[in-house]
Image: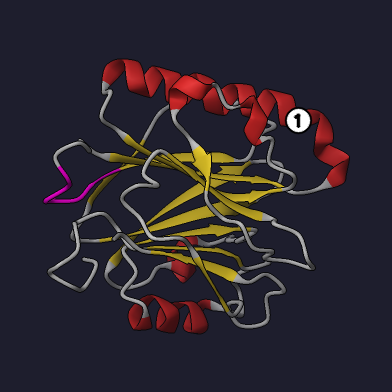
Amino acid sequence: MAGAGSRSALPTVLLANVQSLADKLEDLKKRLEDRDIDVCALTEARIGDAAQAEIEGYTLWLQTRPEKKHGGLALYVRDDITSTVLPFHVPSNLDVLWVRVDPRGLPSDVSCVVFCVVHHTHPHTSGLREPLMAHLMDVVTGIYSREPDTGVVILGGFRDFPEHKIPPDLNLQQVVNKPTHRGSIMDVIVTNLMNHYKKPRLLRPIASSAYKSVYWVSK
């Protein structure tokens, strides 16, 4: 995990919009190996058969919607990190996946890390922005009430993320500040762990995707 012994056990993260994983799995595998990735979040994964998307050494969590018949969101977590999908009620029209990870040796002020993969990038779904933000903020508030020292990482594709709508007491900040697609910031990492991590770096897209990937490592 995280390769270097001088760093904390907070996971090294890769975020990518792959625009279908079907022809990109080999390139993704190489990226995970080269960058020593602990947690990888994918949007627009379009995984029909989870078995064909499995990567040795990782647990794969998928969000699927019956009408789409494909897993649009995916989270790969290294096998040596305990991970559990969280059974929060997600409205059927929202693309959201919640997963808790429990790496060994976390900083003393972080009890666990909850990853929320989200996708909301199309202008024609702008009416879902308010319900999506309400869902995200309600769940984070509930997480804090049960386990105040939880690290929270909301990541994925989100057009024009409304950071001003985050209640100040949730201590969440959007840390991606460079365009990932056609001059726009289409991929976000919203977190309360900004003091534990370096600024995200943009890497080349996965295979033929039009979106740059985001690489995020602890200090």
Q: Is residue 89 visible?
A: no
* Magenta region: 101-107
Residue found at x 74% / y 47%: 159
Q: Is residue 16 magenta?
A: no
Q: Position of residue 218 (x, y in %)?
A: 31, 59
Q: Is residue 8 above or below residue 82?
A: below
Q: Is residue 43 above or below residue 166?
A: below
Quarter holding the N terminus?
bottom left
Residue found at x 67% / y 70%: 211
Residue for badge 1: 128
Q: Is residue 85 visible?
A: yes
Q: Amino acid at mark 1?
A: Leu
Q: Position of residue 99 (x, y in %)?
A: 38, 41
Residue found at x 29% / y 61%: 219
Quadrant of residue 183 in the image?
Answer: bottom right
Q: Residue furthest right?
A: 124
Q: Is residue 99 above or below residue 196?
A: above
Numbered disc 1: secondary structure: helix
Residue found at x 51% / y 23%: 168
Q: Position of residue 65 (x, y in %)?
A: 63, 41
Q: Is residue 32 above or below residue 184?
A: below
